[in-house]
Image (tube, rainbow, N blue to C red):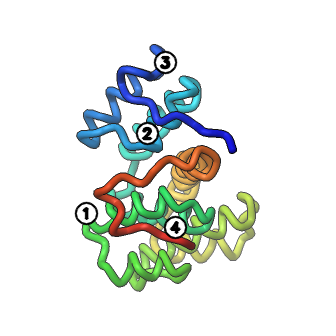
Amino acid sequence: MADFPVHTMQSAPARSKPALQHLQAAFGTIPNIAGAMATSPVLINSLVGLFGNVHGGSFTEAQIQTVLLTDAVTNASTWPVAFHTALALKNGIDEADVRAIREGRLPKGTKLAALSALARTMIEKRGRLDDQDIDRFLGAGFGKDHILEIVAIVAASTITNYTASIAKPPLEAPFQAHAWAG
């Protein structure tokens, strides 16, 4: 079994340290997934740049967390499911909606349901959305620009989902209550 390190600020490659500093400032700590990604400066720097754009886009944090949690569940990636469950709840998503997403169902609100459905469909169809998928999303009150913005969110979450599945970083104590087995 390959053992991937979970880097700290001290052990990370020099080119990974600015990205880790950015994440530490954002979260108050370096998430274990980021410590694992830091093994590759290319990966951690790509993630930080992409996430900066995603979180500065047109969606609310609750909407972003809906997509990120849906992606983690769809990709069956346990660390990101626990992490994004905690962030979804912190950003005001109703517990019943979080539970629904974790169980592979849609949240009850029209907008969150449309975001979750499109994110899941985008992953399941590998980006090959048909006109009905797009029309359903647009019918919920979103624009074509939002569909393309979701591509960026799915790309960012794919980085964390795949890294977690490969590196298997340990789940931090604050997220243990949200552990997920799939």
Number of marks in picture: 4
Give the label on residue 90, or none: 1
Q: Residue at x 43, y 67 (%)?
A: 179
- Mark 2, mark 3: which one is toward the viewer? 3
User: Label 2: few (<14), some or many (≥20) within 10 Å?
Assistant: some
Sequence order check: which comes first, mark 3 or mark 1? 3
Sequence order check: which comes first, mark 1 or mark 2? 2
Vertical relation: 115 (above or below) 159 = below
User: Label 3: few (<14), some or many (≥20) within 10 Å?
Assistant: some
Give the Cα separation between the discs numbered 3 and 1: 32 Å
Sequence order check: which comes first, mark 2 or mark 3? 3
Q: Residue at x 67, y 62 (%)?
A: 123
Give the label on residue 147, or none: none
- Mark 3, mark 1: which one is toward the viewer? 3
User: Label 4: few (<14), some or many (≥20) within 10 Å?
Assistant: many
Q: Amino acid at mark 3?
A: Pro
Give the label on residue 70, or none: 4
12 and 63: which is toward the camera: 12
Q: Is 91 left or right of 40, judged from the image as shown?
A: left
Residue 18 in view here: yes
Give the Cα separation between the discs numbered 1 and 2: 21 Å
Q: Amino acid at mark 2?
A: Asn
Give the Cα separation between the discs numbered 1 and 4: 16 Å
Sequence order check: which comes first, mark 2 or mark 4? 2
Q: Amino acid at mark 4?
A: Thr
Give the label on residue 13, or none: 3
Residue bearing the label numbered 2: 53
C-beta proximity under 8 Å, tags 1 and 2: no
As helix, strand or loop, the secondary structure at mark 4 comes to: helix
